[in-house]
Image (cartoon, rainbow, N blue to C red):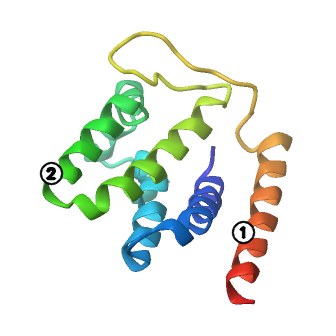
Amino acid sequence: MFKKTHLLLGLFVALYFLPNASNKIIFFPIVLLASILPDIDSVIAPKKDYKLMRKLKSKSYKDFMHSYTWCIFLSLILAFFYPILALPFFIGYSFHLFFDSITVGGTRPFWPLKMRSKGFIVPNGKAEKTINLILGFLNVFLILRYLF
């Protein structure tokens, strides 16, 4: 999925869970940041092919970053050092992983295990565009709900 979809998803998840968050000021940006973190390579250098970025764009790196193994590990580290960040980080990151797992490329959710999770959504296809439209409407609805 594309950055736009993950940002819309992160915004939706953050807005949806925001009423239940104890610290809303921290919760909101951490969910948004975590929702794009697995694709950090395309955020840092989307078009350039720097030497440093070649490793970040490799298939094994993608499998590693798009795994619940890594998500849980990072969440546990945060839970020990910054407990208030752990839950919003896990929520944002795991929703990103779930949405990537339903694309045709899929993910390896429990890396280093070899099994793959694949779906039917073609990146930038009709289904993803429909998801973007629905997420956009839902985000507007949630924002208006909080304002009025």
Task: State which quadrant residue 126 falls in.
Answer: top right
Question: Dot 1, crowdedness within 10 Å: few (<14), some or many (≥20)?
Answer: many
Question: Dot 2, crowdedness within 10 Å: few (<14), some or many (≥20)?
Answer: few
- Horizontally, residue 20 falls left or right of residue 120, namely left
Q: Secondary structure at mark 2?
A: helix
Quadrant occupied by the C terminus: bottom right
Q: Is residue 129 above or below residue 67?
A: below
* Residue beneath the point at 76% across and 74% down: 140
* Residue beneath the point at 62% across and 49% down: 2
Label 2 sits on residue:
80
For the question of whether residue 22 can be seen, the reply is yes
Q: Nearer the viewer, residue 76 or 127?
A: 76
Q: Is residue 51 above or below residue 113?
A: below
Q: List x then y, in percent, for residue 101.
A: 59, 30
- Horizontally, residue 63 falls left or right of residue 98, namely left
Q: Nearer the viewer, residue 5 or 109?
A: 109
Q: Nearer the viewer, residue 16 or 45?
A: 16
Quadrant occupied by the N terminus: top right
Q: Secondary structure at mark 1?
A: helix
* Residue beneath the point at 59% across and 59% down: 13
- Horizontally, residue 145 falls left or right of residue 85, namely right
Q: List x then y, in percent, for residue 17.
A: 56, 63
Amino acid type assigned to the residue bearing label 2 in the image: Phe
Label 1 sits on residue:
139
Q: List x then y, in percent, for residue 125.
A: 80, 41
Q: Earlier in the sequence, mark 2 or mark 1?
A: 2
Q: List x then y, in percent, for residue 64.
A: 35, 29
- Horizontally, residue 139 falls left or right of residue 99, namely right
Q: Is residue 72 above or below residue 21?
A: above
Of the two numbered discs 2 and 1 in the rendering, the one whose residue sits closer to the viewer: 2
Label 2, label 1: how far apart the Cα atoms are: 32 Å
- From this viewpoint, which residue is outermost toward the left? 81
